[in-house]
Amino acid sequence: MKTKTRIGTAFHKFLYTLSPLLLVEYAYFRKVHRAFNPCKPQTFDQKVLWMMLYWRNPLKSRCADKYAVRGYVEENGLGHLLPESLGVYSSSGEIDFDGLPERFVLKCTHGSGFNIFCPDKSRFDVEEAKHKLDGWMKIDISKHAGELHYASIKPRILCEPYLGDPSGKLPIDYKVYCFEGKAHCTMICTDRGRGTTKFDIYDLAWKNVLPYVNPALSANRYIPKPEGYEEMIEAAETLSNPFPFVRMDFYSIKGQIVFGEMTFTPSSGIDLDLTDAAQMKMGKLIRLPAKYRKTRLRTTPH
C-alpha cells in the first residue's frame, strides 16, 4: 500500500472514531466541493448518505452480506436465481484450492470490490490470491467511508462459479435501481474487467437511454434487452420491497437470470459519474424513513 493511501486510510479511521457523520461530511466536501447537510438532504447521493448514517435496519446489513443474503433470497422464493455456492470459509487457509473447479470466483462477504476471478485455474496464482484475501479479511470497510451497515457483517470468503465466457470476459452486469419495491431504471455495465467499463442507464421499458451518466462513460451503442428481463425486474421488485432504496444486481447467462448482490450505497454514497439530472430525479424518488434507532452522531455547524 502506498504511503499516501495509508495516510488517507488512517485519517478516515480517525474521523470515524470521532463521528461517522464527520467522516461523511469530510468525504462529501472533498469529492463534491459542497457541504453535506444531513438536515436537508435533496439529491440521490445525499439521501443515500443520510440512510447510511441514520437508517440502520438490521435487514440492510443482512442483505449487504454476500453470504447471508442468500437466505433472504431463498425466503422470498427466489433461490433458483442464486449461483451455486462452492464453499464458505473463515480464512484463506481453509480453502482447498486443488478441490475447486477450473473456473471460480472468490469474494469476501463484508465489503465491496473484494473479488478474485479465476477463468483458468492453470494460470491461477494461489499464493497471490491468499495474500489478497488475508488483507481484505482484516478490513472493516465501515471505517473507510462510513458505510455503517457493513460494520456488523462477519468477514467470510464465498466461492461461486465463474460466470464469464471461456476467453475470460466477464458477463454484462445489470443493476436495477429500486425505490420502495418499484424498479425505476437499469444500469448496464459492459466491457467489465478491462479497465474501460462502460455504463448506460435504460428506462424501465428499455426504450430510451436516460441522461443519468456522464456521456464519456457510455458504450455509444444499443445494448439489447437481456433474455429474462421481465423475470429480473419482478425479482428485483420482490427483494427490494422493504427498502427505501436498493440497487439490485443481476446477470443474464444464456437466458437464465442469476442474482448478484444488493447494493445500498453505490460508490460509497458519492457517485460522481451520475449527472445532476439523475441526482435530482432519483433523489425525489427516495422517501426518507424515520430514523431506525436513536444514533449519536455529532453534527457540525452549517
Image (tube, helix red, strand yellow):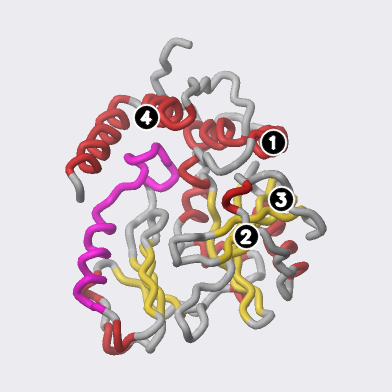
Q: CA distance from mark 1 to mark 4?
A: 26 Å
The residue to which callout 3 is attached is: 181
Residue toward you, 241 or 282: 282
Dominant SS in magenta: helix
Q: In the picture, residue 188 is in which quadrant?
A: bottom right
Check whether the beta carbons of the residues at disc 1 and disc 4 lie within 8 A of each other: no
Q: Write the start and end of the magenta stretch as one range.
A: 125-151
Would residue 249 be seen by someone viewing this image from the given angle? yes
Depth check, mark 3 against mark 1: the one in front is 1
First in sequence, mark 2 or 4: give its number: 4
Left or right, 234 with reference to 65? right
| Secondary structure found at label 3 | loop
The residue to which callout 1 is attached is: 277
Looking at numbered disc 4 in the image, what kind of residue is underneath it? Leu
Check whether the beta carbons of the residues at disc 3 and disc 1 lie within 8 A of each other: no
- Callout 1 environment at 10 Å: few (<14), some (14 to 19), or many (20+)? some
First in sequence, mark 1 or 2: give its number: 2
